[in-house]
Amino acid sequence: MQSRDARRSFEFTPRGLALAAACCAGWLATSDARASARQLHGGPVAGFAGLIGSDIALGGSVGGQVHYGITDAFRFGASLDVPIGARLTSGQIASWPGISVGIAYSLDVGTVVPWLALEARAHAVFATAAAPTWLVGGGARLGVDWLPQRYFGLTFQGTYSACFLDGGLAHMFGVSVGPRWTLDL
C-alpha cells in the first residue's frame, strides 16, 4: 500500500510538476557561475540618471563598462556614462558624461553574483553653449549580475557619486540594466 502512494507522488500532477520546477530553479540558482581571475567582463548599459547640483536634472543614460578579474572576488573596472536630462527649473537640456575607474568586490554565489565597486569619477557638465564645467569626485556602484550561462548574462546596477562643484558638491545617481559578456584571457 505504501509503494502505491510513493508512485503517485512521481506522477505528472500539478503538485509533481511544481516540485520538479522548484528543484530545477534551485539547481539553476546554485550552479557555479565560475567567476575567476583573468576574465574580461563588460557590455553596454542603459537606464535612468539624475544630477543634483545648483539645479536638478533628470533623464536617461547610456554607457558601457569593462572589468578585468584580478582574483575570483576582486576586479578592476572602468565605466563610461552618458546621461542626458532636462533641468527641472528651466527645462534646459543638460548632459553630464563621465568616466570612472575603480575596484569591485564580487560575491560569487552561483548564477546570481552581487558586487560593489568603489570608483574615482570625472564628469563634464554641458548645460549651455559655454565651456563645460568639470567635476571630479568619487562614488560607488552596486550591481547584481545574473549569469544563466558562463559567458553571457545581464547586469543590474545602481550608482551614486559625489563630485566637487564650485566649493560644494554635486550628487549624481542612476540605475541601469544591460547585457554582460565574459571573455577568458
Image (cartoon, helix red, strand yellow):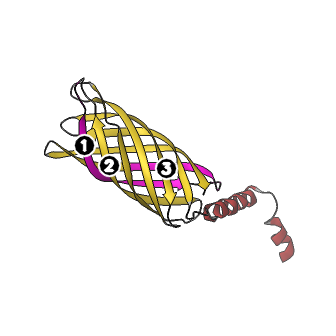
Bin the neighbour count of mark 3 within 10 Å (Cα to Cα): few under 14, some 14-19, many 20 and up: some
Can you give x and y, in whole percent of width and height, for residue 24 in the image? 69, 60
Q: Disc 2 marks which residue? A: 121
Please give the count of numbered marks on the rendered protein.
3
What's the residue type where badge 2 is placed?
Arg
Q: Nearer the viewer, residue 167 or 33?
A: 167
Residue found 29% across the figure and 37% down from its top: 124
In the picture as drawn, the residue positioned furthest to the bottom comes out as 2
Say which quadrant the C terminus sits in: bottom right
Taken as a whole, is the magenta stretch helix, strand or loop? Answer: strand
Dots 1, 2 in contact, CB < 8 A: yes
Q: Which numbered circle lies on residue 53?
A: none
- In what element is the residue under mark 2? strand
- In what element is the residue under mark 1? strand
What's the residue type where badge 1 is placed?
Leu
Q: Disc 3 marks which residue? A: 66
CA gap, disc 3 and disc 1:
22 Å
- In what element is the residue under mark 3? strand
CA gap, disc 1 and disc 2:
8 Å
What's the residue type where badge 3 is placed?
Val
In the picture as drawn, the residue positioned furthest to the left comes out as 167
Image quadrant where residue 130 sits: top left
**In this picture, residue 175 sits left or right of residue 16:** left
Q: Nearer the viewer, residue 122 or 89?
A: 122
Residue 37 is a magenta residue = no
Can you give x and y, in whole percent of width and height, for residue 168 in the image? 15, 46
- Which residues are drawn in magenta? 130-158
Residue found 44% across the figure and 54% down from its top: 77
Q: Disc 1 marks which residue? A: 135
